[in-house]
Amino acid sequence: NGCGTVSMDAVIIGGPPYFTPNQDGYHDTWQVIAIETVPDANIYIFDRYGKLLKQIDAQGIGWDGTYNGNPMPSSDYWYLVELSDGRSFKGHFALKR
């Protein structure tokens, strides 16, 4: 019908809604899902007041729920993912103890 085909690369960014860092082998760290496809992404974790708690590596295991070696309390936390092309994504998750 004279229609052409258009293709685009898409990046889907998201994260688990919670994690439970209790060393039981399940959900012990929090990491953005499918971020290994964007290895140069910067990922930041913030508390509810906007304090930067951790910058995590896109190719690493993620955040273990600590700040300066001390466990953070059960609460909601926020993340920011910045891509090298200037796009950014925000979201939040819960840490459950």
Image (cartoon, helix red, strand yellow):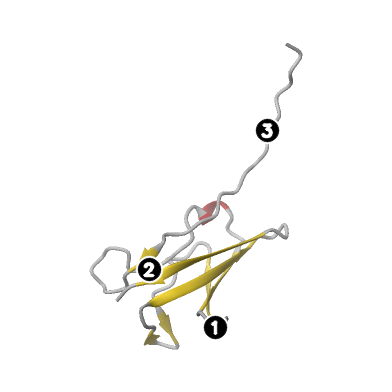
Question: Element under label 3?
Answer: loop
Amino acid type, callout 2: Thr
Which comes sooner in the sequence, label 3 or label 2?
A: 3
**Which structural element holds mark 1?**
loop
Q: Is residue 10 above or below residue 45?
A: above
Q: Residue at x 56, y 49 (%)?
A: 12
The residue at 41%/61% (across/down) is 17
Q: Earlier in the sequence, mark 2 or mark 1?
A: 2
As shown in the figure, which amino acid type bears the numbered disc 1? Tyr
**Among the 4 quarters of the image, the one containing residue 29:** bottom left
- Left or right of 20, for residue 39: right
Give the distance between the C-alpha atoms of the residues marked 2 and 1, in whole angstroms: 21 Å
In x, y percent, where is residue 2?
76, 13
Q: Position of residue 51 (x, y in %)?
A: 56, 84
**Callout 1–callout 3 Cβ contact below 8 Å:** no
Identify the residue under disc 3.
7
Nearest to the eye among marks 1 and 3: give it. Answer: 1
Say if 18 sits above or below 76 in the image.
above
Q: Earlier in the sequence, mark 1 or mark 3?
A: 3
Q: Which residue is mark 2?
A: 29
User: Which kind of residue does numbered mark 3 sit on?
Assistant: Ser
Spatial CA span between label 1 and label 3: 41 Å
How many C-alpha atoms fall within 10 Å of the one at disc 3: few (<14), some, or many (≥20)?
A: few
- Is 23 located above or below residue 71 in the figure? above
Q: Could you say which disc has been placed on residue 85 in the image?
A: none
Task: Please state the horizontal and vertical placement of residue 58, each as a whole percent of the image.
Answer: 53, 63
Q: Quadrant of residue 42?
A: bottom right
Circle 2 sits in a helix, a strand or a loop, which is it? loop
Per the image, the residue denoted by label 1 is: 49
